Amino acid sequence: MCQRNDTVRTMKWFFIWSLLLGLLAGPPSVAQTSHVVVVIEVDGVINPLTAEYLQRALRRAEATEAAALIVMLDTPGGLESAMRDMVQQILEAPLPVVVYVYPQGARATSAGMFITLAGHVAAMAPATHIGAAHPVPLGGQLDEVTAEKLASDAAALIRGVAAARGRNVEWAEKAVRENLSLTAEEALQEKVTDLVADDLQELLLRIDGRRVTTVRGEITLHTSGANIERMGMNFIERLMHLISDPNIAYLLLSAGALFLLAELSDPGLGVGAVGSAICFILAFLALGSLPVNWAGAALLAAGVVLFVVALLTDADAVVTILALVPFILGSLLLFSPFTPRSPAMPDLRVSPWLIAGSSLALAAFSFVVLRAIVKAARMPPRSGAERLLGMRGVALTDVAPTGQVRVDLQDWSAVAKDDWVKAGQPVRVVGVVGVRLEVEPIEEFDKPSDGA
């Protein structure tokens, strides 16, 4: 009987300890709802900064053991080197990468199509579109052989990407060779993408439970109810991505030229020099991420040089007008390279209104400064005491007819023009006699004393 009681007591303690341990451990379902997805937004032209942003996001997602990385994409295209870098990163990603063309009205054209098809899951929001990846030359027509080589290279890349993800290889190639595009619904029907979702929450619900294959093997997505960690660009990435816009880069070049003219018109390391240096440095950084026609850049430089020549040589308005010709031509050709354009690159150009505004601003500034220089050149030179003509001062002693006065914080010998001047009386310089100032009393000085 005693042995039986010991057994019962042991079972009771075992049950109590098991219950406590179970409470401390928590329910199994908690681990299933604690998944995290990292979300980034790639908006605008694809460039080395967006490739670095994606790489940093992949490292972050892997470090936090995220269930997936969501790339919210809206781009007209970009540099081929940056696009290939991003495609390789996604293909070799150790965790699922979901490329989501969002928001409504967004696009994934040119480079964007390559990146979207590389995703383990390709999704689109309603009213978005994808495609239009045919190589288009800028600055001239391509011969048939070069055009075919360029198209074949791009087609081979997109066929490989589409085949790796089990997507419509035939349509992907046509998008390159025939410049085709599809809406979100059409892309789903053609099996170019995997689903259409209204927003991020619906996307996470729709892809939950989907099985994808990464370089580490097959993975089941657990995204329903997952915590969302949004990861934005850092300050340097945001700045570089902003100035990589063709209009911003051109505006920086124009502002740098304007600051340069302002500094040369009034030399001395001031606001003009600092502003010019900052604008030109940022502009050159931006040009490194854009397809630049260096002939256009040379024409821009020639135009700025002519503006400087007109400024420093007191040339007439003809030189300023001539400077506008290379400046405007260079502006139009700046992002129109003569080499074949990559299929990943959108049609980049500077707004004609911005070109007109910048040209008018430089011309107006040159005319204003030149007019001031010419006017100053025609005035008789003044040096020494002559610069004090018309200025006011005060008599230090009686000037009867000679004495001492103080003008412009300097003491001068003076001679009275007509009447003698009392000490302490305000005077005005009306002439120069040898090394002496010729002064006259200011009449208003005696008026208050008359009523005393």
Image (cartoon, rainbow, N blue to C red):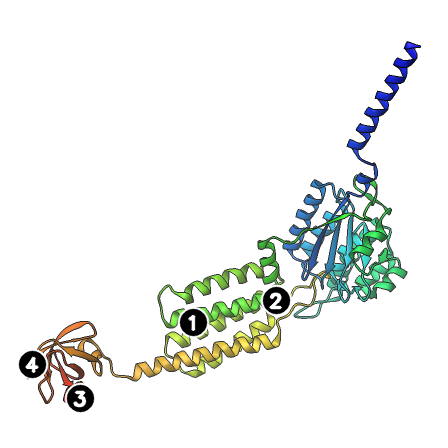
Quarter of the figure with the C terminus = bottom left
Q: Secondary structure at mark 4?
A: strand
Q: Secondary structure at mark 3?
A: helix
Could you give the CA–CA distance between mark 3 and mark 4, rounded to whole angstroms? 24 Å
Looking at the image, residue 47 lies above or below residue 30: below
Q: Which residue is mark 2?
A: 246
Indicate the amino acid at tag 3: Lys
Q: Which residue is mark 4?
A: 402
Label 1 crowding class (10 Å Cα cut-off): few <14, some 14-19, many 20+? many
Number of numbered labels in the structure image: 4
| Residue drawn at the location 76% of the way across and 67% of the way down | 105
Please identify the quarter of the rendering in which residue 190 is found. bottom right
First in sequence, mark 1 or 3: give its number.
1
Which-is-in-front pick, marks 3 and 4?
Answer: 3
Which-is-in-front pick, marks 2 and 4?
Answer: 4
| Residue drawn at the location 81% of the way across and 48% of the way down | 223
Q: Does the CB distance between marks 2 and 4 fall below 8 Å?
A: no
First in sequence, mark 1 or 4: give its number.
1
Indicate the amino acid at tag 2: Pro
Q: Does the CB distance between marks 2 and 1 fall below 8 Å?
A: no
| Residue drawn at the location 33% of the way across and 83% of the way down | 375
The disc placed on residue 261 is 1
Which-is-in-front pick, marks 1 and 3?
Answer: 3
Quarter of the figure with the N terminus = top right
Please identify the quarter of the rendering in which residue 311 is found. bottom left
First in sequence, mark 3 or 4: give its number.
4
Q: Which residue is mark 3?
A: 447
Could you give the CA–CA distance between mark 3 and mark 2, rounded to whole angstroms? 68 Å
